Image (cartoon, coloured by chain):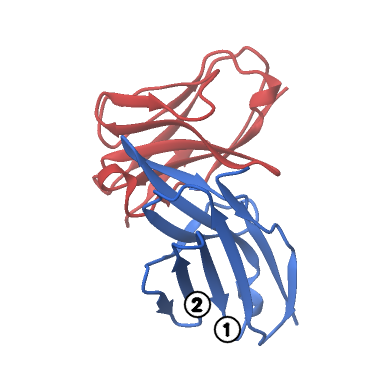
Amino acid sequence: EAQVTQNPRYLITVTGKKLTVTCSQNMNHEYMSWYRQDPGLGLRQIYYSMNVEVTDKGDVPEGYKVSRKEKRNFPLILESPSPNQTSLYFCASSPWRGSRGYTFGSGTRLTVV
Amino acid sequence: RKEVEQDPGPFNVPEGATVAFNCTYSNSASQSFFWYRQDCRKEPKLLMSVYSSGNEDGRFTAQLNRASQYISLLIRDSKLSDSATYLCVVTSRRGTYKYIFGTGTRLKVLA
């Protein structure tokens, strides 16, 4: 089944404790992206990647890192999480530069206390 | 002004009703247009792409008006299962395709 898999689905952590949210897709998509969704603000792009070893900042990259060492994986790293990073996070992928609609992962609900 | 604007709703409609949502966008160079559906606390799912000539998928019809810079979604014969938030998405080409999401319009179909 074609899908984007995110883990974990739920995570509660403490301020400053590094964490990684994993994202993997099995559709051979070049384009991958991370979003956060907050009430009233909609989906905002954190980082995106056009292909292996090619990543760039989205609209709200502060406090996040990403890497794209393999085509299928695009982990999101929070080196020192803070409470304002409490949010619902989605990973998404798309073929060819994102022009054909995204497939989203199931989401990760992160709470930083 | 937001790049993509939607009426947040909620739109409360009875089963069987026809309901329409509009979405306006500010960048005239926008290239691709989509409607996504999002159920509460779940991931957005692609409902349909929107083409200049208009397109239909069962009870759903999407239209694009480039001159006035809006897209619309029409749902006929609403079902309880249509209750969700509908996200308008516009892409622009700034080096790569950048997706810009509206904040969504909430639909509640009532029995």
Label annotation for residue B104: none
Would you name the residue on which mark 2 appears? B60
B94 left or right of A62 in image: left
Query: Which residue shows up at 38% across the image and 55% down it?
Result: B32
Residue sitting nearer the eye, B38 or B101:
B101
Question: Residue sitting at 35 percent across and 23 percent down?
Answer: A67
What amino acid is at disc 2?
Answer: Phe
Image spot of residue A14 (x, y percent): 68, 18
Tell me the crowding category of disc 2: few under 14, some 14 to 19, or many 20 or more residues within 10 angstroms, Cα based. Answer: some
Q: Is residue A59 left or right of residue A95?
A: right
Q: Are marks 2 and 1 in contact (CB under 8 Å)?
A: yes
Question: In the picture, which chain is red?
Answer: A
Provide residue A93's location: percent of width, then percent of height.
36, 44
The answer to whether A40 appears left or right of A69 in the picture is: right
Instruction: Report the amino acid beneath label 1.
Output: Arg
**Could you tell me which residue is drawn at 58 percent across and 52 percent down?**
B42
Q: Give the position of the C terminus of chain A as an image quadrant.
A: top right
Mark 1 secondary-structure assignment: loop
Quarter of the N terminus of chain A within the rendering: bottom left
Residue marked by disc 1: B76
Nearer the observer, A81 or B73: B73
Q: Please state the chain letter of the residue tagged with numbered disc 2 in the rendered image.
A: B
Describe residue A111's horizontal placement relative to residue A26 as left or right.
Answer: right
Residue at 41 percent of width and 66 percent of height: B50
Q: Distance of mark 2 from mark 1, alpha carbons?
A: 7 Å
Residue A40 higher or lower than B21, as above or below: above
Residue B38 can be seen in this image: no
User: Farthest front residue?
Assistant: B67
Q: Do pointers 2 and 1 mark residues of a single chain? A: yes
Residue A22 coordinates in the image, percent (x, y): 43, 32
Colour representing chain B: blue
